[in-house]
Amino acid sequence: MAELKSDLMEKLLSIPKAKKISNKEIALRCPFCGDSRRDPNKTRFYINIDTENNKPILYYCFNCPAHGILTPDVLRLLELSDLSLNGELLRYNKNSNKGSRISGKRYQKNIRVPKYSISEKSQKKCDYINSRLGLNYNVDYWTKFKIIFDLEEFMKLNKKIEFGFNDREKWILDNYYVMFITSKNDYLISRNITDKGQRYKKTPIFKNNDNSFKFYSIPNQIDILTTNTININIAEGTFDILGVFHNVRNREVKDNIYVSVTGSGYKSVIYYILSEGIVNNVSLNIYSDSDKDVNYYKEQLKDYLIWFQSVKVIYNTLYKDFGVPKDMINQREVIIK
């Protein structure tokens, strides 16, 4: 263990502009975001290597959301290619304590989601979701998907938060919208359940929030060191990805990630997933709206295809998207890779 970490330290410090911050930390230029554009000498990508324990070797960037467990693929991004070192690192990762789970806690603000509610307001929103997707689950089930049915209840439960919306906005959201908490707990992606007002809203949960990753993902944990294929399933909207999860992939959670873009851009979402360290045995399934041609995705993904075993764009021939009941879905696949 100590020999591996010592060897790794030496090789990392040989990278141009690498700096030893302490006996445990090295700072480099970030291979994911390119680091600071204004100052070419900035090194905001940190790798923590503690030789006194068997905890995972972690990396994190202070310039972008990149963080995770150091893997051979990250070393390749840093232009370190050593088969012997790669093999030792893989073996170490498999044996290190809690080294195979992604938590993402460094980038998630701490919030609490209200438990089961049987109010008329909550039931109306629950009925809307069930009707859209042809399902029959209660409010308690849907809250597991980071869905807010009662904003007032949510605010009481998180009373220490300085919220990023005013009383008027709160009243509108609470009465007209069902709300989805984004992946990093920063925004509410809301869908109007009536014919009044704006159809969709993106509302910051925290005051002065400048986070740009406003996408939603179904909560799940993935073993990034598995030898199984990991399926990344992406759709445009929150109801689309809920439809994919329930009506296409039959609630399959093992080795599956479910993300809705919600206008953030496919590049941003894929970049974020790869920055989590999920770069081995990955298949990408894009459940597309019918108005997006496959060439659009080829252009979006041209710099990322190398990371995937396979890439498919899937259309629903019976409707414009996948946010519908199961009997309204018929899949047509276009293989990109």
Image (spheres, rainbow, N blue to C red):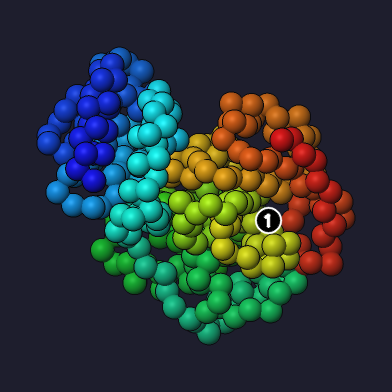
| Residue 237 position (above or below residue 142) | above
Using the image as rendered, state which of residue 59 and residue 267 is in the foreground.
59
Residue 200 at least partly seen = no
Residue 132: x and y, percent? Answer: 72, 66
240 on left or right of 57 = right
Residue 256: x and y, percent? Answer: 58, 57
Q: Residue at x 32, y 67 (%)?
A: 158
Q: Residues within 10 Å of mark 1 (few under 14, many from 20)?
A: many
Helix, strand or loop status at disc 1 = helix
Residue 8: x and y, percent? Answer: 27, 33
Q: Residue at x 69, y 59 (%)?
A: 244
Picture quadrant of residue 135: bottom right
Give the labeled residue for mark 1. 240
Amino acid on which disc 1 is placed:
Asp
215 on left or right of 319 = left
Q: Residue at x 63, y 40 (%)?
A: 309
User: How many discs appear?
Assistant: 1
